[in-house]
Image (cartoon, helix red, strand yellow):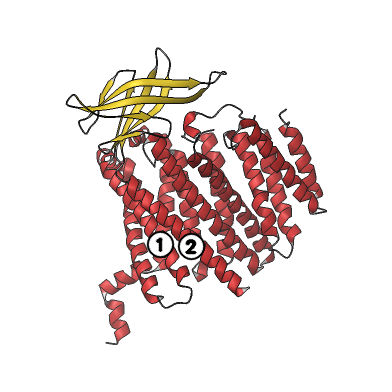
Amino acid sequence: MMRNELENTNIPVKILQFFLSLRTAIWLLMTLLCLLFYGAVVMPANEEFLALHTEPLFRFMAETPPGITWWLWAAIGVLSLLTANTLLCSIESVVKKKRARHWMLIISPQVAHIGFLFILLAHMVSGYGSFKGTAVVYENAVLRLPGGSDVLFRKIDVDMDPMGYMKDWTADVEYFRGGVSLGVDRIRPNSPSFRDGYGVFIKNIRFQPYLVAMVEVCREPGAVWALIGGILFMAGMMTLLFSKIKKEEAKG
Amino acid sequence: MPINPVFIAILSAALYVFGYYRLPFVYGGFLLQLAYMVSRGTELGRLPLTGPHDTLFFLSLSFMLFGIPVSFSLKNRQRFLNPVTAVTVCFMFLAMLARPHSFPLPPVLKTFWFEVHVAFSFFSYALFGLAAVLGVLYLLSGEEETEILQYKMILVGYFLFSVAMIFGGIWAYYAWGTYWLWTPKEVWTVILWLFYSFYLHARLRQWWSGRPAAVLGIAGFGVVLFTYLGVSLLMKSSHTF
């Protein structure tokens, strides 16, 4: 048998060729688009999806009938294939073209690809281990965090403008464990308080019947991975843009 | 004293119409729009980026903000700026259908992350809109450089849109404890991002380059419009006006 014929009949080689193909990436992206488009249409029409706002993704998918969540399962399947495709294509591109003249143009899309994969990883991690709990608290109320610490809401202050609009608010909190104070903190808009991997957020403040704060306790284990992914993606894209501009200038 | 936005819109539109005959009128229309946005920002003490009036006007202004510099790289500036002014005027008058939102911002929106998230989103929408215009011009003329310029617009727009998404995620994490919410706006934002990812990858293949890529670039603006206006007006979301 000739070498080419052998390669054509070798199944692992065929699988590798499938994953190394740009055509595969295009088909996978197109399939993913169709699945998400379907999801975007059915989600607002099905009340079951409201649970997605409070539960980790994978628990929601395990508890909800597959007849409703099939597109999410399919999207995760497509994303898994896309991950393999992205990784292999990036490795091949760097290895094949490592001696190319415009090396930054080769490496920068791969950095963006790695950033994208980190963001996917973040969603997977959060999909397994995220937590969200809500409560309504008033001054001097105590909440038990899932980690075992207690948080005491010592003081809630609201700053109103003369027209009656809320300008700012703060909540002074103190953490305890077993009756021993662990420290104090202040929660402000866009500045939550973190303790034992959990974030304490104030989502809203109401005055009726008396001053109360809507509190959300969250854990988002994928956040760090998402941030790393975001930074890598931006760095890759920015380098790609500058490299392209430089190449254009060199041509001109 | 606040400036009447309808007066500004009519005057700008008139200048843009004269721009069909003499290009400097287009620059005049742009400067007038810019002056209105600056006056709104001064009045509010922040970037005017909340509510349909300000966001539509900001998008309208962004078309020209990018459209004018881009026109200098084209042989026939007039041929490109004519449809761009039409789109600009169209969005400016859509902005006039909504009342200006002059209330103080809720505390959670007073952050750098929010301002950059929204401003970059609209800059990217404008670049995607310009790419659609260039796509139409390419289909009509078949000039290769027009299609290349469309690709460049989409590449820069995609970068800004990605930055807007990342900054939105950072802001959402600090505001609500999560960088991702399963609301229609977020899902459609991902659809839009994936659509342009699809465009950028597909264009690398011979079969998709040229006319199919130009058509994709035009269709992308349809997805932009639904993500911005359709979702905000038709579906309940954290981004609802």
Number of marks present in the image shown: 2
Q: What residue appears at the point 68 percent right and 34 percent down from the top-left corner? A: B96
Quarter of the C terminus of chain B within the rendering: top right
Which x, y percent locates residue B29? 75, 45
Spatial CA distance of label 1 from label 2 is 9 Å
Tag shown at residue A239: 2
Describe residue A226's horizontal placement relative to residue B141 as left or right: left
Q: Position of residue B104 (x, y in %)?
A: 56, 27
Q: Quadrant location of residue B143?
A: bottom right
* Pointer 1 with pointer 2, Cβ within 8 A: yes
**x, y (%) of residue B43?**
65, 31
Callout 2 crowding tier (Cα within 10 Å): few <14, some 14–19, many ≥20:
some
Most foreground residue, B4 or B236: B4
Amino acid type of the residue that numbered disc 1 sits on in the rendered structure: Val
Residue A68 seen by the camera:
yes
Residue occupied by mark 1: A111
Q: Is residue B30 left or right of residue A202?
A: right
Q: Do the residues at discs 1 and 2 belong to one chain?
A: yes
